[in-house]
Image (cartoon, rainbow, N blue to C red):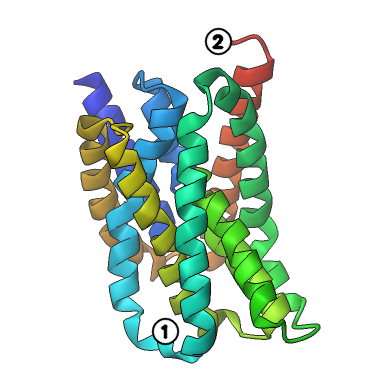
Amino acid sequence: MDSFLLLAGAGFTGGAMNALAGGGSFVTLPALIAAGVPSVPANASSTVALFPGGVASVWVYRDGIKHVPRSLLLPCLWATLVGGALGALLLLSTPTTLFDRVLPWLLALATIMLTFGRRISLSVGAREHAHLPTMVAVQFVLGIYGGYFGGAVGLMMLAAWSVLTGLSTKMFNPSRTLLTTAANTIAVLCFAVAHAIYWREALILGAGALLGGYTGAHIGRRLPPNVIYVATVVIACGMTLAFFIRAYGGAR
């Protein structure tokens, strides 16, 4: 019962965070590990739990995908799928002990993007319009990261596309949702085939995340954006610090 409440609460919180500002995996992943799931399948199970919310977002944003030309979006979509599969396979081949030591650095990278990603994407502006091979290569690398870990990958895409194409955050956000969900889709399939998912825990998290996402969307209409942003960054920093202590501070 204790683990059920922990996972349900973490799912609700993570779903609400994703609806408000992103960063839900900062809550769901530690909750799975606290519930006794090893870190590699915990990462896989967290991806599965938050996956339905991404699919729902793609459906909501479907009309806005047309802002990115198909001649650019489709090759980048394929690159993301291939990269996501490679990232998922890399995760599955990573020993748990090694992943435990890599995880804090991935969380730190995600925290940096969570803190500064939107500011970068809004302020830098495009220096040049990148050629298709450049965009495909960038999206392939981001797909690998998305399949392997995925924290704040959407913000990384927003920043990269803003710099390389000049698309505004508003114009690219629907396509960003599609690309991040594509990486998660292929990763979820790989995790399922490899039997790397703790389904009971993932389903509890997922149910909580759906309810949290719905609630978070309504809360977001009332709370000031700065309050949401600060709370999300504080949680991300706290979880990152905790995992550094866990990995390198002798707490096992």
Direction from residue 244 to residue 215 in the image, left or right? left
Q: Decide: is 245 above or below 16.
A: above
**Location of mark 2 (residue):** 252
Residue occupying the point 66% across, 63% down: 117
**Location of mark 1 (residue):** 65
Q: Nearer the N terminus, badge 2 or badge 1? A: 1
Direction from residue 35 to residue 242 in the image, left or right? right
Residue 15 percent location from the top left of the image: 35, 52
Classify the position of the C terminus by image quarter: top right
Kind of element beneath mark 1: helix
Residue 88 percent location from the top left of the image: 46, 43
Q: What amino acid type should be assigned to the residue bearing mark 1?
A: Ile
Residue occupying the point 30% across, 45% down: 49
Direction from residue 119 to residue 38 in the image, left or right? left
Disc 1 crowd rating (10 Å Cα; few below 14, some 14-19, many 20+) is: some
Residue occupying the point 41% across, 86% down: 64
Which sits in the foreground, 226 or 42? 42
